[in-house]
Image (cartoon, rainbow, N blue to C red):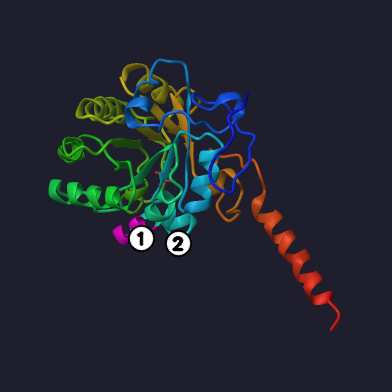
């Protein structure tokens, strides 16, 4: 028999399958942890991860069986209206992590360390602890060998760490745009060294953003922790998307690597126009 959702006020939701999510229904199974995600390496089970920035989206993604939910600093662009992620602050991340954590997901709830919040080892540990105090169960930061001391210190302080290599959105200003990584041999070698270093430093998984598909495939073969791709081809151990991109909520951004599965922006405009027309047609 399908497991029923027991959350107060909720009934049953038809959901996708995922270990612990029986017959397509929300699982009563164990909480997803960094260790349980890491253990999926080599299991054949792909990891489908998405971003959320608030309570309802976190709850809905969790009810759909998503095992890894990231409060990404894409927050800056998709919720707060900044031109890029370098404007996102620690208080903004904490605010949205608190909202997402109130959904008490079964999924592992990870949070991005904002721009310049992990420049030093002391900053990295203090800011990661602030995100954990806000409700994050893991943190993600961008970079490889250049942030290894910070990664080791965060892991040593008991905070699960998710790596992020390839195109690093927090470097958009220095790099003058969002460029695919791994095309040149030095970049390919640097990605290999960075991914192996992050795994050795204790990262439980590594996001690969805009890495060429062959390099992402090779990294996935050689690195002992799951790779989670975004715009990096089909051969990673998992995939992650920015949820509003998947749902077609932001028609002003057009991305090569995402084919929206819904045109939520147009549907919202239509519903709002129809409702407005109905209100305006009401008799006095
Ligand atoms: O900020 C974010 O949403 C991310 C994902 C794109 C992986 O880092």
Which of the 4 quarters of the picture holds residue 223?
top left
Is 154 above or below relative to 250?
Answer: above
Instruction: Return the disc, 2 or 1, that comes first in the chain's sequence.
Output: 2
- Residue at which label 2 appears: 80
Q: Position of residue 15 (x, y in %)?
A: 61, 33
Q: Quadrant of ligand 1?
A: top left
Circles 2 and 1: CB atoms closer than 8 Å: yes
**What residue sits 61% from the left and 27% below the top?**
2
Distance of mark 2 from mark 1, alpha carbons? 9 Å
Q: Main secondary structure of the magenta part?
A: helix
Along the line of sight, the residue nearer the viewer: 149 or 125: 125
Q: Which residue is mark 1?
A: 92
Disc 1, SS = helix
Residue 159: image x %, image y %? 24, 39
Give yes or no for residue 108 being in the magenta stretch: no
At x 55%, y 44%, the residue is 60
Q: Residues within 10 Å of mark 2 (few under 14, many from 20)?
A: some
The image shows residue 156 at horizontal and vertical percentages of 16, 35
* Relative to 208, residue 178 above or below: below
Residue segment shown in magenta: 88-95
Query: Would the CB of label 2 be found within 8 Å of ligand 1?
Result: no
Specify the farthest residue to the bottom.
Answer: 284
User: Can you see residue 8?
Assistant: yes
- Residue 175 appears in the figure: no
- In this view, the residue farthest toward the right is 283
Pick the residue in front: 37 or 213: 37
- Could you tell me residue 26's position as x and y percent? 55, 33
Q: Residues within 10 Å of mark 1 (few under 14, many from 20)?
A: some
């Amino acid at each position: 028999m399908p497991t029923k959702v027991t959350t107060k006020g909720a009934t049953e939701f038809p959901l996708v399958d995922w270990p612990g999510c029986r017959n397509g229904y929300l699982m009563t199974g164990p909480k997803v942890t960094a260790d349980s995600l890491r253990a999926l390496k080599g299991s054949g089970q792909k990891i489908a991860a998405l971003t959320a920035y608030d309570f309802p989206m976190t709850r809905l993604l969790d009810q759909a069986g998503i095992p890894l939910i990231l409060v990404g600093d894409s927050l800056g662009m998709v919720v707060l209206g900044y031109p890029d992620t370098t404007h996102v602050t620690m208080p903004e991340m904490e605010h949205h992590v608190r909202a997402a954590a109130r959904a008490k997901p079964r999924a592992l709830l990870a949070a991005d360390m904002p721009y310049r919040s992990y420049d030093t080892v002391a900053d990295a540990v203090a800011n990661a602890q602030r995100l954990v105090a806000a409700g994050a169960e893991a943190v993600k930061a961008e970079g490889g060998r250049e942030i290894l001391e910070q990664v080791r210190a965060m892991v040593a302080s008991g905070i699960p760490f998710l790596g992020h290599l390839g195109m690093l959105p927090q470097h958009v200003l220095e790099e003058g745009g969002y460029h695919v990584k791994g095309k040149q041999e030095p970049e390919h070698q640097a990605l290999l060294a960075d991914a192996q270093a992050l795994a050795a430093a204790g990262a439980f998984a590594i996001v690969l953003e805009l890495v060429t598909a062959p390099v992402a495939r090779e990294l996935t073969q050689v690195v002992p922790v799951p790779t989670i791709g975004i715009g990096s081809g089909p051969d990673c151990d998992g995939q992650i998307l920015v949820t509003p991109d998947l749902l077609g909520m932001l028609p002003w951004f057009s991305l090569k690597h995402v084919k929206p599965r819904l045109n939520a922006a147009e549907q919202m405009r239509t519903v709002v126009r129809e409702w407005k027309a109905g209100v305006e047609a009401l008799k006095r």
